[in-house]
Image (cartoon, coloured by chain):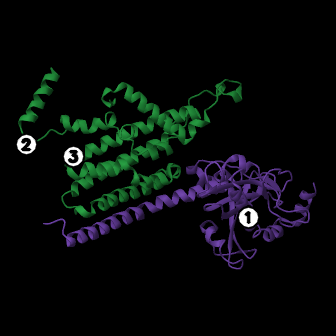
Amino acid sequence: MADVLEKKEEAKDLLVDKQPKEPLFSKKNRKLLNDPLNDNNPITVQVLGICSALAITVKLYPALVMSISVLFVMAAGNVIVSLMRNFIPNRIRIIVQLVVVASLVALVDQVLKAFVYDVSKELSVFVGLIITNCIIMGRLEAFALGNTVWKSFLDGIGNAFGYAWILLAVAFFRELLGSGTLFGFQIIPDAWYLANGGFYSNNGFMLLPPMALITVGIIIWVQRARNTKLIEE
Amino acid sequence: MDVNKNSYTFLFATAMVVVVAASLSFAATNLKPFQDTNVEQEKMQSILSSIQIQVERSEAPEAYGTYITEAIVLQKGEAIEGQDAFAIDLAKEIRKSDEERLSPLYIADKDGETYYIIPLQGNGLWGPIWGYVSLKQDINTVYGATFDHKAETPGLGAEINTPVFEEQFKGKRMLDSNLTFVGIDVRKGDASTEYQVDGISGGTITSDGVETMILDCVKEYVPFLKEHSGKTATAALISE
């Protein structure tokens, strides 16, 4: 029944050239949110923003703070650029985008320093490097400059979540296998460790950047095996 | 309106810069008090850590009030008035001449024992390094030390802020048998005497930085401490 209704709606989309009012979460808009999570994931499919994915995924908490920061910068940046899209002089549009992103990042950096000081020390330069995160510039240039505010907002949120879930998945495995904890809470019982007469030892290699790359690689492998759309000829 | 005209482009860029500058400085000014509190709390946490008291950053001010009984400022080996020891920026002081240099000293009381906490500031390989070293009442034996750095190489020089490196300093001596200040030798291998600790493999320049920092900073305090802690106590402890 739902399928039929959806098909009807699609048909209507095709018939009517200009819709006077599109519902907030129309199929197209939902696609903006869903697509970056899987089919068009910025990290695993477009392979952007790898640098920070390697650097700050040793522990879950910093990865979470980083994800929230990127979510804010991406959503706000998309909205601001989309609001200004008809006023931005074409010749300096990249500079304008950079200024928007850089000011948002500077703001995030200040807020982190004020309220989550320890995490901000851990993230150190990587907060500043959000500016150079290709995902953000890519979305501003490719999407926000040509689309309405609401759509750009959804696109920003969608891509940020696409980035965030990969970051958190990588951090989950690295913290669990590398430190035996999750969000700082001990998961592997003390008695299991070799030092206490057990059989287990944390894998120090998980804490090093190469394992982040390998973990991302495994996620890409699993994703491509399950998602037939991504399999190339 | 033509958005691609030169005049419009200039106007747009100017307006953008003004708006961005105003909003960012507004945010920075309003968040500054919170950030300063964090930095202060962290400083208190490090000071306490040098006398082997580990507290959460948020609890540091309270513990600081409990343990640190006095904070004085030295100039040319004499205590001077009218300076806030906690507010002194050591990074600036180490560049001044010996006559002008101000040296803050924290005196702690822990379980009835007095400890002298000396702040350190020096240079590593890539940037500044700093720390705190606490001396026992004999002003000779190190009770604890804590170090930190701005930009040393992770896994190499950056290891100076790990417990493995810091623990080595406990029980080391700063004065030789003639009560002359000699500092602590951070060396490559074979740290056998009570004046030596092991440096960090691959972090030689940072390790040397720690050694120089201790020599350079602690020497400012030796005359004052000798005078105020009683020479007999010092000699007795050394001969034991």
**Residue A65 seen in render:** no
Which type of secondary structure does the marked residue at label 3 adopt? helix
Considering every residue shown, the one lying at the far top of the view is A1
Q: What residue type is labelled 2?
A: Lys
- Chain of the residue displaying label 3: A
- Chain of the residue displaying label 1: B
Q: Where is residue A5 in the image (x, y as percent from the top left)?
A: 13, 25
x 53%, y 56%: residue: B38
Q: Eyeballing the image, is A25 above or below B233?
A: above
**Observer-nearest of B221 and A66:** A66
x 84%, y 60%: residue: B138
Which type of secondary structure does the marked residue at label 1 adopt? helix
Check chain identity for marks 3 and 2: say if they share one.
Answer: yes
Mark 1 or mark 2, which is nearer to you? Answer: 2
- Image label count: 3
Residue density around tag 1, few if under 14, some if 14–19, many if 20 or more, within 10 Å: some
x 54%, y 42%: residue: A209
Q: Residue A150 carries which label?
A: 3
| Quarter the N terminus of chain A occupies | top left
* Colour seen for chain A: green
**Observer-nearest of A218 and A110:** A218
Chain painted purple: B
In the image, taking residue A146 as reference, residue B205 lies left or right, namely right
Q: Which mark is residue A18?
A: 2
| Quarter the C terminus of chain A occupies | top left
Report if the CB atoms under discs 1 and 2 are less than 8 Å apart. Answer: no
**Observer-nearest of B6 and A82:** B6
Which comes sooner in the sequence, label 3 or label 2?
2
In the image, taking residue A132 as reference, residue B10 lies left or right, namely left
